[in-house]
Image (cartoon, rainbow, N blue to C red):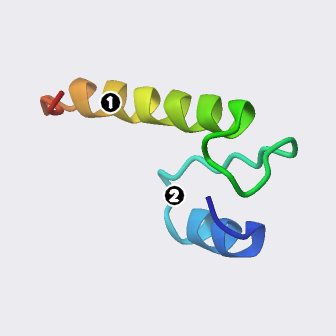
Amino acid sequence: MTRAEIAYKLAKAWPEAELQIVIEAGHNSTETVPAESLTAACERMKARLIATGLKPGN
């Protein structure tokens, strides 16, 4: 989790990046909404890695 401006700049510089701004999120990654968003992002990354033939660790 980072400032929106920094995340936006990173997403512009990295075309494969997926920028999601979670309005309901605070600064604590253990709150429900940020935790769910982070978990979903990890699952999407895992699927992308598997699709490219990489086997992510457990």
Q: Is residue 49 above or below residue 3?
A: above
Residue pushed farthest right?
Answer: 23
Label annotation for residue 11: none
Image quarter where the N terminus lies is bottom right
CB under 8 Å between discs 2 and 1 = no
* Nearest to the observer: residue 29 or residue 56: 29
Residue 45: percent from the left, percent from the top? Answer: 39, 35
Q: Quadrant of residue 55?
A: top left
Q: Is residue 18 above or below residue 56?
A: below
Q: Amino acid at mark 2?
A: Pro
| Disc nearest the viewer among 2 and 1 | 1
Q: Residues within 10 Å of mark 2 (few under 14, many from 20)?
A: few
| Residue on which disc 1 sits | 46
Q: Amino acid at mark 1?
A: Lys
Residue at point 72% right, 58% down?
27
User: Helix, strand or loop at disc 2?
Assistant: loop
N-terminal-most mark, 2 or 1: 2
* Nearest to the observer: residue 29 or residue 11: 29
User: Helix, strand or loop at disc 1?
Assistant: helix
| Residue on which disc 2 sits | 15
Q: CA distance from mark 2 to mark 1?
A: 18 Å
Residue 29: percent from the left, percent from the top? Answer: 61, 47
Residue at point 72% right, 70% down?
3
Residue 10: percent from the left, percent from the top? Answer: 57, 70
